[in-house]
Image: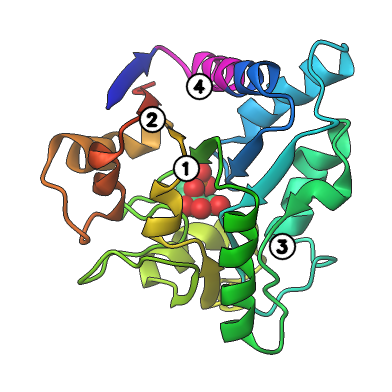
Amino acid sequence: MKIIEVESYEKLSLLAADMIASQVLFKPDCVLGLATGSSPLGTYENLASRCGEGRLDFSRVRTVNLDEYCGLTAENPQSYRYFMDQNLFGRVNIDPANTHLPDGSASDMEAECARYESLVESLGWPDLQLLGIGHNGHIGFNEPAEDFPARVHTVQLAESTIKANSRLFDRVEDVPTMAVTMGIGTIMKARRVLLIAGADKREIVERAFHGPVTPQVPGSILQLHPDATVIFTRS
Ligand code: F6R
């Protein structure tokens, strides 16, 4: 695994956007695995600017997102679909039909998990998967556990995750307690993985990428991925 330290969040975002843009240039109909949250905001901003200036073409790109809250419809401003539309999809020339997230409002979540896993497989798995990491080491919404989950599944969010994500809700009680997420097995099938981590993630970056591989720190599995890059900053 390649671990790259940069001096600022701006540099991190620029470098991550460079990697994604080169993937799109190399394979214009590539499948990008995408993440939500604070970490990729600068990366998405960079990609949107490049696209606006005509330097990047998303017209043939397909995307699959990692996860979605259960119980929120696409129109809900707290949903990850809404986040992606606002921060990336609505700002680049991507065909909305080529953008995919799990449907957190599906009435049969078991069927939805199976549908989403098959969809990602039918697209040939991501050429490049972008990830953030939680303070507890989660990637996607794969929380610390006894085993690494293989496939798309629903998950009970950890108390610490609910607390961390409550910054984006009016009240902590409004944060959904369940989510649907790609499994660790799904994520590991991506040809390349890029994890970005800002200064607030110093401690977990150390534990996940310089410590033992364990499902108690789900992100640590990336040490075993054949093509994983971590870009992080301490400031
Ligand atoms: C989001 C996701 C999560 C976040 C992680 C870090 O789609 O899968 O694993 O990447 O919670 O979130 P931020 O970037 O907000 O610190």
C-alpha separation, residue under disc 2 versus residue under disc 3: 24 Å
Q: Is residue 89 magenta?
A: no
Crowding at mark 3 (Cα within 10 Å: few <14, some 14-19, many 20+)? some
Depth check: give the residue in front, 186 or 220: 186
What secondary structure prevails in the magenta region? helix
Give the SS element for disc 4.
Answer: helix
Sooner in the amino-acid sequence: mark 2 or mark 3: 3
- Residue 203 in view, yes or no: no
Q: Amino acid at mark 4?
A: Tyr
Task: Determine which of the numbered discs, if any, sits on residue 78 in the image.
Answer: 3
- The stretch in magenta equals 7-19
Residue type at the position of mark 1: Ala
Q: Which residue is mark 1?
A: 190
* Residue receiving disc 4: 9
Residue at coordinates 47% horizontally, 42% vertically from top-left? 190
Quarter of the image where one finds residue 72 = bottom right
Dot 2 surroundings within 10 Å: few (below 14), some, or many (20 or more)?
A: some
Horizontal and vertical percent for residue 188?
Answer: 38, 48
Q: Amino acid at mark 2?
A: Ala
